[in-house]
Image (tube, rainbow, N blue to C red):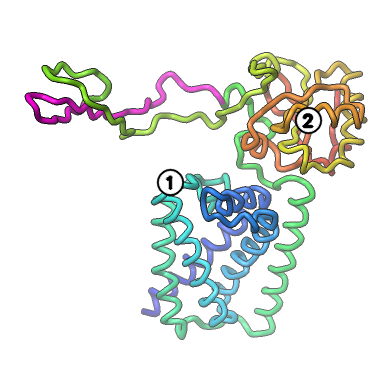
Amino acid sequence: MKILVGFSRVFVGLLFIISGFIKLNDPVGFSFKLEEYFSFGVLNLPFLEPHALKIAIVVVILEVLLGVLLLIGFRVRFTVWSLLLMIVGFTFLTFYSAYYNKVTDCGCFGDALKLTPWESFTKDIILLILILILFFKKGYIKLIFGAGFNRFVTMLSLLACTVFAYYVLNHLPAIDFRPYKIGANITEGMSVPEDAPKAIFDYHWKFKINGKEKIITTQGDYPTVDGDFVDVETIEVQAGYEPPIHDFTIEKEGVDMAPEFLNEPKLVVVVAYDLAKSNYKAFEEVKTITDDAIEKGYKVIGMSASSEDFKIKLQKEYKLNFDFYFTDQTTLKTIVRSNPGVLVLENGTIKQKVHFNDLDELKFE
């Protein structure tokens, strides 16, 4: 039992620290995931949506701290109770996602590691078992260092998490796990290799033959049957390859102009997923840097999911010398965790990407 508790302690502690740190690296992204859970179509808790970012920060810092407390054996009773309550909550959410197919990615490890809903649920069940062992056998969890040193480690961990959270919130994630990171080529990210696995579907054809219903299964071909067709049910049995970047468009009046813009040798993109929630003061500096970019031969465009009227109003108010195009809001949230944020592209390759607090770092050659 001592060995089992020791293994559970190290495994759970490290996993909570790693999982928490990955989400702490991108709390805005985790808050988007929480907004999905809080939305009307999922848990129907819309009153929590405006507080998603605050909840995200508290949850991820607590996750890291609980991992640290477990490893050093400090405040054991508080730690195991907190771990148990947290994993019960996580297990419920991942089961709900998997069973009802509501949120297809729980965000457990942010964008660093994508898990299917059932994989996430399985992971949480394993953690629940290990945490239950720790809960009922907490007497085996002993202090590694003295109480004074443990308090120092705990306070240092809390301070480090707080400072790190403040930094990434006011800039961009320190580590970018998304397909739109600096150096990535968007066109290549959308391409599908010739040898990529294709999706496989089973077609369950229902016919009425001699007054009786019969189901014949094929993988696409219409069966040769001497009877009357009734219905067909299609089930995906093997998922096909999905490129890292999908649903990426730059539309104007229903026309996708992405291929044209991604071939521009000097392109500046102002991204604002929702202009109603943007930091408006930042557009004063956006005006300055985009005018400078235009003078130096750059093509400048805006990308937003907001209405055309809102885009025109913003252009007039801040005298912006570029047009806004429509792009899906989820895609824009993935591209940059800033509203607004600015990217510099060269033939579809992202060369620079900054938060609105760092616009002065942009360099135009």
Number of the label disc, if any, that sits on residue 101: 1
Q: Would residue 179 appear left or right of 119 to someone viewing this image?
A: right
Q: Is residue 56 above or below residue 230?
A: below
Callout 2 secondary element:
strand
Q: Quadrant of residue 333?
A: top right
Q: Are marks 1 and 2 in contact (CB under 8 Å)?
A: no
Is 197 part of what is drawn in magenta? Answer: yes
Placement of the N terminus among the 4 image quadrants: bottom left
Residue 358: image location, x then y, percent:
84, 41
Identify the magenta region: 190-217
Q: Amino acid at mark 1?
A: Asn
Callout 1 secondary element:
loop
Q: Is residue 36 above or below residue 216?
A: below
Residue 331 seen in this snapshot: yes
- Which of the two labelled residues, at mark 1 and mark 2, occupies the earlier sequence position? 1
Residue shown at 77%/37% (left/top)? 275
Placement of the C terminus among the 4 image quadrants: top right
Number of the label disc, if any, that sits on residue 270: 2
Crowdedness of circle 1 by 10 Å Cα count: few (<14), some, many (20+)? some
Spatial separation of the CA atoms under disc 1 and disc 2? 34 Å
Q: Amino acid at mark 2?
A: Val
Residue shown at 64%/47% (left/top)? 29
Is 68 part of what is drawn in magenta? Answer: no
Residue shown at 64%/52% (left/top)? 31
Residue 281: image location, x then y, percent:
89, 42
Q: Quadrant of residue 308?
A: top right
